[in-house]
Image (cartoon, rainbow, N blue to C red):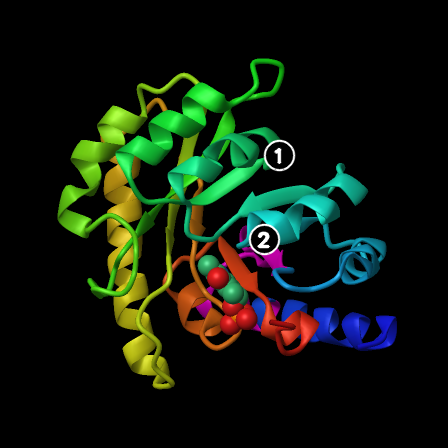
Amino acid sequence: MSPQDYAHNLAQVNQRIQQACLAAGRPATSVSLLAVSKTQPESAVAAFLALGQTAFGENYLQDALPKITAHPDAQWHFIGPIQSNKTKPIAEHFDWVESVDRLKIAQRLSDQRPSDKPALNILLQINISEEASKSGFLPNELMAVAQEIAQLPGLVIRGLMAIPAATDDPVAQRQPFAHMRRLFEQLQQTLPNQPIDTLSMGMSGDLEAAILEGSTQVRIGTDLFGARRI
Ligand SMILES: *Cc1c(COP(=O)(O)O)cnc(C)c1O
């Protein structure tokens, strides 16, 4: 992919976001774009930064670290599965962690967040389609665990993230996203002292449905960078 391809892809994705906001009767500024740069080279991150894209999502720690070192001023979001022996470098190097899926992981991230950095922004990942193969809290355990996580001094809860079961049907896509929005509103009521403003849902294949149901952040890989490298 050339820088021109990236510019074209970014313009297309931003246009889809704007169109979906228009259809939903929402301001175009109400949805942010997370560029999912997992498996992509540092040069691709540099190209998107030059185009004005500032927030990047990564799933694999070792793949991410050289890109973060090269571009420390970008905003880095960890969005992949978290092994407990990897929490320290994640707490040290990322600005956000969107894939917090266990209380123990939250406790470790809080303990290991360097004291000279602001509290780590986190999203709680929800297994919204209740799939055995997916990680995340189940909807019915969310509120109790969120109240415990809200006590951790190194973290600030910003909202929720989910990856629903994949389907191509735009009507069926909306159902889990609508459920996420209800949980998001309930979380805001349960934790009035946390700045809960981020509902991260929608990927290349379903961003329109997610925005119709209230997403505030879409996470896009394939439609920005092309097919993944690994
Ligand atoms: C890979 C990934 C994405 C991006 O998916 P695309 O379909 O390539 O846009 C979004 N969120 C998470 C958690 C991912 O792992």
Q: Residue at x 30, y 27 (%)?
A: 149
Q: Which residues are magenta?
A: 18-36
Mark 1 vs mark 2, foreground winner is 1
Q: Which amino acid type is marked by label 1?
A: His
Does 143 lie within the magenta span?
A: no
Residue 186 or residue 107, whichever sits in front: 107
Left or right: residue 115 compared with residue 4: left
Total count of labels: 2
Q: Using the image as rendered, state which of residue 65 and residue 210 is in the foreground.
A: 65
Give the x, y percent position of residue 61. 57, 47
Whether the residue under disc 2 has CB within 8 Å of ligand 1: yes
Name the residue nearer the viewer: 130 or 22: 130
Residue 56 seen in the figure: no
Query: Disc number at residue 57?
Result: 2
The secondary element bearing badge 1 is classed as helix
Q: CA distance from mark 1 to mark 2?
A: 13 Å
Image spot of residue 186 (x, y percent): 23, 41
Q: Is residue 38 above or below residue 78?
A: below
Per the image, the residue denoted by label 1 is 93
Q: Does the magenta run of residues contain 35?
A: yes
Q: Name the spot of residue 44 as percent of width and height, x first.
A: 78, 63
**Up/down of 34 relative to 175, above or below:** above
Q: Position of residue 110 (x, y in %)?
A: 42, 23
Q: What's the amino acid at mark 2?
A: Gly
Q: Is residue 113 above or below residue 57?
A: above
